[in-house]
Image (cartoon, helix red, strand yellow):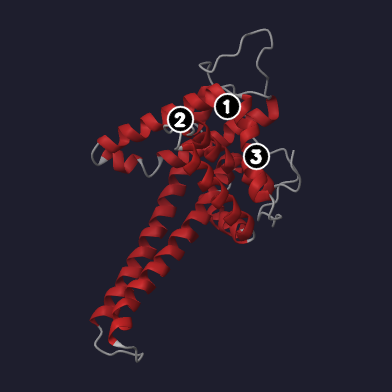
Amino acid sequence: MDNQNDNQPYTPYAPPTADIEFKPGSEETNFIPGGRPVSMGNGFSWISSSWGLFKQQAITWIMFTLAYVGICILLSVIPVVGDILSLFIPTLIIAGVIYSCDLLRRVGSFTFGDLFTAFQRKTGSLMILCLIAFGLLFLAILLLLVVFASSIFTDSPVFDYNEVFASFRPSLLMILTGFIILVTWAMSMMFAPALVMMHDIRPFEALQMSLSACLKNLLPGFIFWVVLSVLIILSLIPLGLGLLVTIPMFFICYYTSYRSIFFDEEN
């Protein structure tokens, strides 16, 4: 893939720089299919690395944030169709961000159009990924509701709890189980867009691989989400302007964490 002409001024409105035959990441031999466990400190380095990628093209990332917020607002006011598209568009955007970050790491720049590459490349696979993921989530929640309903209407208590605790126990158990289901689903989706986009891995296999990688890195993952949540809350203080930085950093972290876990060295 040719780099941008150094004699031409950079413009974020340029067409995508990616050659249609280019397969990002395919030539790298240090890819680890199942991911690897990393140290606790990586939970911080994913965020610091995202800042490094952000500041290389801050204006383009800010433009992306404004566009993303505009898309979210538009989808929220379109009945039915907007809800359906909301199932797919975030994953497509994440895949495009991952692709753009890889361009930035490899050739030193990307264009605004590259951020939406997934709307033209690997679109079908990424949409299938979403359908499988949300289908599994729906079935898990449906099963949970069935089990919960049966526990309410079954007139044969197994445990001898006092009346007050027994009335709360089904609700608490349902909340805990639902939380576990959502976290498991989120871990399955964490790296799946990157694996489909960058390595052409089949959607269901990508979900399994992502879940396996996350389970190997629960502690750094927990630290990452706590620190990132604090940063996002702090970015709300100056009239929310800090979100112009933390929102793109959040998306970039999908790439930095993927590179850290699925490759045996940072490069």
Tell which circle, 1 or 2, labels the residue nearer the N-terminal end: 1
Q: Secondary structure at mark 2?
A: loop
In the picture, the quarter occupied by the N terminus is: top right
Identity of the residue drawn at 57% across and 56% down: 222
Q: How many neighbours does mark 3 have within 10 angstroms: few (below 14), some (14-19), or many (20 or more)?
A: some
Q: How many neighbours does mark 2 have within 10 angstroms: few (below 14), some (14-19), or many (20 or more)?
A: few
The residues bearing labels 1 and 2 have C-alpha atoms spaced at a distance of 36 Å
Tell which circle, 3 or 1, labels the residue nearer the N-terminal end: 1
Examine the rendered structure and indicate whether residue 204 appears above or below residue 26.
below
Q: Secondary structure at mark 3?
A: helix
Pick whichever, 165 or 133, lies toward us: 165
Residue holding disc 2 = 241
Q: Name the disc covering residue 48, or none.
A: 3
The disc labelled 2 sits on which kind of residue?
Leu
Cβ–Cβ below 8 Å for labels 3 and 1? no
Quadrant in the rendering for residue 27: top right
Examine the rendered structure and indicate whether residue 41 appears above or below residue 115.
below
Q: Secondary structure at mark 1?
A: loop
The disc labelled 1 sits on which kind of residue?
Ile
The disc labelled 3 sits on which kind of residue?
Ser
The residues bearing labels 3 and 1 have C-alpha atoms spaced at a distance of 31 Å
Pick whichever, 29 or 220, lies toward us: 220
**Residue 79 x %, y %:** 23, 39
Identity of the residue drawn at 63% across and 31% down: 53
Residue holding disc 1 = 20
Pick whichever, 180 or 36, lies toward us: 180
In the picture, the quarter occupied by the C terminus is: top right
**Residue 77 x %, y %:** 26, 35
**Residue 33 x %, y %:** 66, 52
Is residue 214 among what the camera can see? yes
